[in-house]
Structure formats: structure tokens, C-alpha cells
Amino acid sequence: MPGLRSAAALGNADWHLGAPLLAALATAWHTDIATVTEGIAAYSLGQGIALPLWGWFADRYGPGVSLRAGLLLATAASAGLALCPGPTWWVALRAAAGAGFATVTPSISLSYESLRPAQVRQRAFTMLTTATGASAIASPVLAEVALGCGSWRPAFAVIALLTIVTLFRVRITCPAPSGAGAETRPEAPAESSPAGTGSLPAHSHRAARATWSGYPTLIGLGIAEGMVMLGLPALLAPALAVTGGGTSATTVVVTYAAGVLGSTLLMRRRSRLWKPQTLLATGGALAAIGAFLAATLPGTAVLMLCAALLGTAWTYLHTTLQTWIPRLLPPAARARAASLFSASAILASSVTVALAASLLQKGLHSTVFAAGAALCALFTCWTVLLARRWM
């Protein structure tokens, strides 16, 4: 478990590391911000493309093999970034780093599938969220320390070093299953199948139907979560810049991460006592309230409050979905379920941020966040209805 949490924390830290370094990169390479910003888009694209591939790989060869292979690619990409000579290599290597760290989601999801009952799985995901929340705070700090030393390169050297250390830890904590392929893993008990879905060979026809019906639901939920739970937090920094406040974008990231970390302490208890519907409804309500406040009372203080509420909502909503979403597909496709959900969320958030950022520049701040609040409400209702199958 520590090795898995370290892998997730490093992937999240690497995700947040690029933005604080953009100005330094543009200065070092005598180019503009727009050119080096392409590295952020390339990172998301690399992740979105690689996630389904890693999901298949984890289902076929086991989470340990998949995680080690992805971390090896991420280590090589991060080491290359520490020596990167120019913008073209920067974009290519950021895409490779995103593709490498993309293995974390399906590999960890499949590793946690062995945990019973569901409350134990959710507590494990909550602890994972604690690690990723802390890394979101540590990442901009690492960037500032590296810049204080006179160069951005040490930041990626640190990521490469920590990733290779984690890779060797994973060799102990996440071994590959005996034999290759999902066929060697024991079938999950009845809890692991959605209502009406059989997972034993005698129910193969029903399992096949459930597989095909589960894919649209997974992708739709991923798109919805990407638009509201990833898109809205990413829009807080541009909204802050438009309002003209003196607060930095780093403060928004830290406030959001603090909301994530603070709520994980509550979730460890409530995940044992509350039903999935209650957890989802609580998280969705907090997100909708935060977006509504940002739409009606624009200003620095309200945006900070919105960041904290969205961070709290992420813990309630995302850990619950992480716990149950893979169960929409049969056991042999659980890693693919997690990877398709995440890939849909990442790609949807990229499109959402690109479209909404242009609206913010046009002064449509209230429109953007009002639409976000409405989408939060719809997304919450959908997940609560879906959670009836989990019960």
C-alpha cells in the first residue's frame, strides 16, 4: 500500500509541476508562454490516450507489471525533462510523462479490488486521496525551491529520482499475480457485480450484456466528472486573474488541496457509516454551492471558498465513484473500467477548460460558474440514482 500511494502522489505532483514553471521555461528558451503551455495540453493528451491501453495491460498481466512498466516510462521521461534542450522536446517529453503516470489509475484500482467489504476499499481510496492532496501542495513548493536554486531542471530530477525509488518499492508491495492474464484471478463475490450481472461462467451471456451496457455509463460519468470536478477547479486561477485580485494562482491550488486533505479526515469515519448515495449527495451539494457562490458573488474571497468547497466535494464524490465504478464491468475488465472513466474525465476537462477560459476572458464569469453549478446538480442526481444499483 505505501508503494501504491507513493506512485499516486508522484503522478499527481508531476501533473501540477508544469504550470508554476512556465514563465521560467519561456525565459530560458527565449519563447512565449503559449509555446511552453503546449506541454500541459500534451501531458493531458498523453494520459488520455495511454489510460485505456494501461487498463487493458493491467487486466491482462496484472497491476504490478503494469505499474512498474508505467513508472519506468515516467522515470525516463522525467530524467529527459531535467536535461530538456528546448520547447519541442519539452512538449514530447511531457506527453511521455503523462502516458507513463497514466498507469497509476488502473493499476491501483485493480490492486484495491481485493479489499472487502466496500467500506474498506473506500477507506483505502480516501487514504490515497490524502497522499495526492499533499502532493498537490508539495508540487508548487518544489517548483519554487528549484527556481530559487536558479534553475527549473532540479524539479524534474527530483521527480525522476523519487519515481525510480517508488518503482523498487512497488516490486515488493504490488507483485504480479501468479500466471498471466485476468483468467488466473479468482472471481469476485456477489458484492462485486452490479445488480443483475453474473460474473461466473454460467452467467457469461448476462456478463457480456452488462459489459456493453456498462461502457456508455462509464464514459458518460467520466465526461460529467471531468467537466465539473476537474474543469471547475482548473478555472479558478483564470477567474482569479480576471477579477484582478492580488492572490496568486498557487494560493488557489493550496486552498483546493487543503479542502481535499481536511475532508479526508472526515471521510475515514463517514465511509463506514454513510451509504454511497449520502456521500455522493453531500459531495455534489458542496460542489454546486461553491460554483453558485462563485457565480453570484465574484471576488477573491469567494473564489477561495469555492476552491475549498470543490476540494471537499472531490473527496466525497470521487472516492465513492472510485470504489464502485469498476463494478459496472465484470471482474476481467475492472482495470479497463477505471481507465476509461479517468480518460473520459481528463479529456472532457481539457475541452471544458479551453472553452470556458475564453468565456472568462470575455467577462462571462457568472455564466461560466452558473453553468458549472447546474452541471454539478445534474451530475449528482445521476450518480445518486446509479448508486441504487450498488446497494
Image: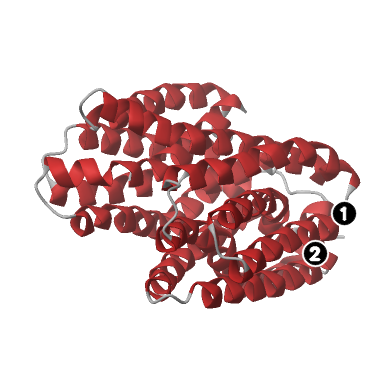
Q: Secondary structure at mark 2?
A: helix
In the rendered view, tell whether residue 270 sits above or below residue 227.
above
Relative horizontal placement of residue 383, taking residue 134 as reference (left or right): right
The residue wearing badge 1 is 275
User: Viewer-proximal residue, 95 or 17?
Assistant: 17
Residue 302 is situated, as x and y percent measured from the top left of the image, at 60, 57
Q: Which circle marks residue 179 in the picture?
A: none
The residue wearing badge 2 is 387
Determine the residue positioned at 61% across, 39% down.
258
Residue 224 is situated, as x and y percent measured from the top left of the image, at 59, 70
Determine the residue positioned at 40% across, 29% down.
163
Relative horizontal placement of residue 316, taking residue 271 as reference (left or right): left
Determine the residue positioned at 15% across, 49% down.
87
Residue 217, can we see it?
no
In the rendered view, tell whether residue 300 sits above or below residue 366.
above
Relative horizontal placement of residue 64, taking residue 354 as reference (left or right): right
Determine the residue positioned at 50% across, 65% down.
344
Q: Quadrant of the C terminus?
A: bottom right
Residue 44 is situated, as x and y percent measured from the top left of the image, at 38, 56
Q: Quadrant of the N terminus?
A: top right
Identify the coloring.
secondary structure
Residue 289, can we see it?
yes
Relative horizontal placement of residue 255, taking residue 152 as reference (left or right): right
- Whole-angstrom CA distance, mark 1 to mark 2, is 9 Å
User: Viewer-proximal residue, 303 or 70?
Assistant: 303
Disc with the residue nearer the chain's start (1 vs 2) = 1
C-beta proximity under 8 Å, tags 1 and 2? yes
Which amino acid lies under the numbered mark 1 shown in the image of this protein?
A: Lys
